[in-house]
Image (tube, rainbow, N blue to C red):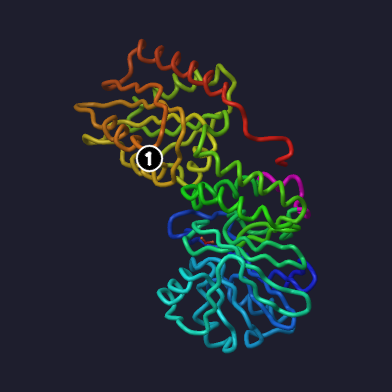
Amino acid sequence: MKAVKIADKVFWIGANVHSEDLFEGIWPIPNGIALNSYVIKANKVAVIELVREWGGASMSFIESLRSLNLTLKDVDFIILNHLEPDHTGFAHILKSLSPKAKFVTTEKGAALLDGFYGIDENIMVVKSGDKVDLGENKSLEFIEIPHVHWPETMASYEEDSKILFSGDAFGAFGVHQGSIFDDQTPEVNKPYWEQEMLRYYANIIAMFSPNVIKAIDALAQFKINAIAPSHGLIWRGKPEVVIKKYSRYANYNKDFAEPEICVVWGSMYGNTEAMLNAILKGIASEGIYIHIHRVPNEEPSFILADAYKSAGLIIGAPTYEYSMFPPMKYLLELLQKKHMWHKKVIYFGSYGWSGGAQKDFNALSEHMNWDIIEQLVFKGHPTVQDLNKGEEIAKKFAQSILEIPSKIKDEDY
Ligand code: FEO
């Protein structure tokens, strides 16, 4: 790959990875993922974020450096904003191939560098406000933004170009589609990035939302011309818009999210599905935006994105051998783990010889600040009265969700 110029002496040297692998071993990436690395080529050479060896990423990284007449031996500083191995997997190779380079990270990052790669020398430990001078008017200032995503995370700010290298913050799943920049992205491709950014947030960042809010506050003191995250697009057209969008995401688990409903259902023999149809009829009569997902047929990664964004959540699943239908139990555990809080919720489901799903639902939803509007549990197939009740409850539920104001403003796009 050829390096892509972002600003004077600042270049993208990352890689677009297409892989059948799951990200973090859990999350599907049918659109691949961009591992963004950057280099500042001044008197001193600083590489910001690395890649891991994945789908040719490390070779692409080396070739991009070569396109700038640089080799790994020329690197003076390796800035590790975040130690997760998607950005550091190449570190142990650079340890020998970039002998003069110093690894720059926070104190917690240094411990992880040792733990993951056995690197315990040539490390510069930094904290908020520390700077590295690269000469030729280029410098980097570091800002600790813990838990966006891991506890050691920091961002790096280049004052001359006013570029913020933000780590996972403001990132997205998905490879670049012909351009690394938001302002070169055609309108038709914007929904791709919107969806992949939300999915990345819901899957990876959501549980750290209070830290995201603190990080946005900490970064407000900097004049930012461009945001260069470690995944996804570089935001240089309207960086303030992506900051607002991220702030909106971070607040989705603090208060009710968007006036939309996410319906997640599973059914063994069509009895829970019969109630699903009654409920959908009730919701549809109100004209509200509905996302419908079936488990286990659909990947939780995509369900989490829609569930996170929706103020209304409807969970339909039967009892399976004295407990919750297992794929729904897994999904509920993920909703709990990812802090998908503050939702209005309906649960419904069928049981045969005994119940059990409702008990699991109550236990798993206990600490999520959910406003549980109704639980519809029925033996075997729902009666006509059950179905009428389900339709009526769903209609009122949709009306209550529609009263929640949308957080999306026109200027967000
Ligand atoms: Fe892209 Fe948290 O690593």
Residue located at (35% from left, 42% from top): 327
Left or right of residue 406: residue 350:
left
Residue situated in front as seen by the camera: 60 or 134: 134
Q: In which quarter of the image is the C terminus?
A: top right
Residue 154 lies, in percent from the top left, at 56, 64
Callout 1, which amino acid? Leu
Q: In which quarter of the image is the N terminus?
A: bottom right
Magenta segment range? 183-191
For label 1, the residue is 332
Inspect the magenta stretch and tell me whether residue 323 lies in it: no
Whether the residue carrying mark 1 lies under 8 Å from ligand 1 is answered with no
Residue located at (39% from left, 13% from top): 389
Residue 114 lies, in percent from the top left, at 43, 77
211 up-or-down from 120: above or below: above
Task: Name the residue furthest front.
Answer: 129
Task: Name the residue furthest left.
Answer: 353
Q: Is the magenta stretch mostly helix, strand or loop?
A: helix
- When asked about the image quadrant of residue 225, the answer is bottom right
Left or right of residue 364: residue 100:
right
382 up-or-down from 263: above or below: above
Q: What element carries label 1?
A: helix
Q: How many labels does the image show?
A: 1
Residue 263 lies, in percent from the top left, at 47, 31
Residue situated in front as seen by the camera: 101 or 123: 123
Residue located at (71% from left, 75% from top): 40
Left or right of residue 169: residue 377:
left
Badge 1 density bin: few <14, some 14–19, many ≥20, Cα 10 Å: many
Residue 278 lies, in percent from the top left, at 44, 19
310 up-or-down from 191: above or below: above
